[in-house]
Amino acid sequence: MPLPGPYRRRGPSSPAPTGRGPTWPTPVARTRCGYCARSRTCWTLTTSSTGASCALRPRGCLEMALSDYQRDMEGCSRCSSCKWVPFNQIKSWRFAKNCPSICRYNFHAYSGSGRMIIGLSLLTGRSELNDHVAEIVYRCQLCGACDTACKVYRDDIDLTEVLLELRSHCVEQGFLMVEHMATIDALKREDNVLGEPKAKRGEWAEGLPLKDINRERCEVLFHAGCRYSYDPDLRETVRGAARLLLEAGLEVGIAGAEESCCGGRAYELGYRGEAENYAEDLLSRVKASGARILVTPCADGYAHFRYLYPRMGKELPCEVLHITQLLERLVSEGRLRFREEVPLLLTYHDPCHLGRMGEPFLGEWKGDKLQRPMSMKRSGRKGVYEAPRNLIRALPGAELVEMERIREYAWCCGAGGGVYEAFPDFASWTARERIEEALATGAEGLATACPWCVRVLRDAAQEMGAELPVYDLVDLALEAAGIAERERV
């Protein structure tokens, strides 16, 4: 029976899809095993006679539990630095906060520190998980801004990992958002978070001279991602990205209808095993393709390929690049030329997954606080910041003007962490805040490099009636290369 309110416990698995993507078995029994929520690998295993645990833990699963982060939660200084851009970086009071959740709801529980208190209270038995607590956990874009601000002052706390573990804890205890379950069901049915037909995933590439990696090898494997593959407003953008690579003389291949989700959204929603299976699927495809470069225009996919996959022991045997990095390289090498004027004063929005969440994996931490010197952890500083800006500077006639919150301290677009699906009003509010910051620069256009950012920021600008076009950087590169004009002719 569904629970009252917006949550209900995990139900039976949907039928497995056909095709070469990950399989989705039906669970053999309803159990209270935490690993069942984390990995569908164990769903097919025989359960014990009591139904209390699985006979075997999932192979390779990220087995950190909430208790592994007790030192982080106990060590939180309650200083509230996680709510603000670091003080020496603040330009004005208006754009001083960095966390959309605390800024929107204005109650400490909605901050990174507040969620640390919640986690510690659950762990020590001082409180119990309920619908309201779970809603606080999920009203977060997982943008990493709180973690980045915290690490300016503390190098021994991994706030983002605590937030992710809280979500896994919610899944294990059966507190699931209906909207998030719909996303997981869409993955089960069609291997994409939008629930669109898997057979249509490669339609965006019709007519382009791209190799089919299911039958032949290639130099560059192009992973379009879910949003680019299906969003009709982004169809020409993803086609343009492939055309730019072909224009530079690269041998580009795609998986077409066999391409699957990166699995990152499932991981962020608390379903870690789903992400692991998708990582295995992509790893096998990369090996079979012989590609030396995996490139994607999707910031979410890039972040998960660079950080999550290696953490799961699924490091890809090739160079992983975002499309802006590869285009910057091609321009600097003279293999791609920008000849047409793009006379715009542009400001640039740093996508969270391309910026602070796009850092490479620096090694497993496993909760050890006694290392001297401390091992490097995610700090937000090693994300992709220069490549998009260098692309803008390379556009003939274009000028770049920066917003106040940029790079690792950039404000989130609002679409991440399942907020776009479960709390669209919150996602829209967050995006409108970013549009206001962009308007304050006097820019004639807002450029970014993530399909989710483009989608939610365009919608926000339209809702506000703002005269601020939102561009994907690929579209601007197409104009400068003259390819967009040739397409129209």
Image (cartoon, rainbow, N blue to C red):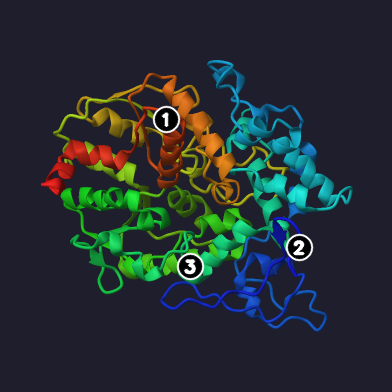
| Distance between the alpha carbons at the discs numbered 2 and 1 | 40 Å
> Which SS class for mark 3?
helix
Say which of 374 and 176 sits in front: 176
Q: Quadrant of residue 159?
A: top right
Residue type at the position of mark 3:
Glu
Q: Is residue 226 above or below residue 259?
A: above
Image coordinates of residue 286 in percent, x first then y, are: 37, 65
Q: Residue at x 60, y 52 (%)?
A: 364
> Which SS class for mark 2?
loop
Q: Earlier in the sequence, mark 3 or mark 1?
A: 3
80 sits to left or right of 61 = right
Q: Is residue 472 above or below residue 220?
A: above
Say which of 262 and 139 sits in front: 139
Residue type at the position of mark 2:
Leu
Image coordinates of residue 315 in percent, x first then y, are: 47, 59
Residue 366 visible from this viewpoint: no
Q: Quadrant of residue 45?
A: bottom right
Image coordinates of residue 266 in percent, x first then y, are: 56, 59
454 sits to left or right of 311 = left
Q: Residue at x 34, y 32 (%)?
A: 469
Crowding at mark 3 (Cα within 10 Å: few <14, some 14-19, many 20+): some
Residue 65 visible from this viewpoint: yes
Q: Which residue position holds label 2?
A: 3
State the count of labels. 3
Q: Which residue position holds label 1?
A: 465
Q: Which residue position holds label 3?
A: 280
| Distance between the alpha carbons at the discs numbered 3 and 1 | 44 Å
Viewer-nearest of discs 3 and 1: 1
Crowding at mark 2 (Cα within 10 Å: few <14, some 14-19, many 20+): few
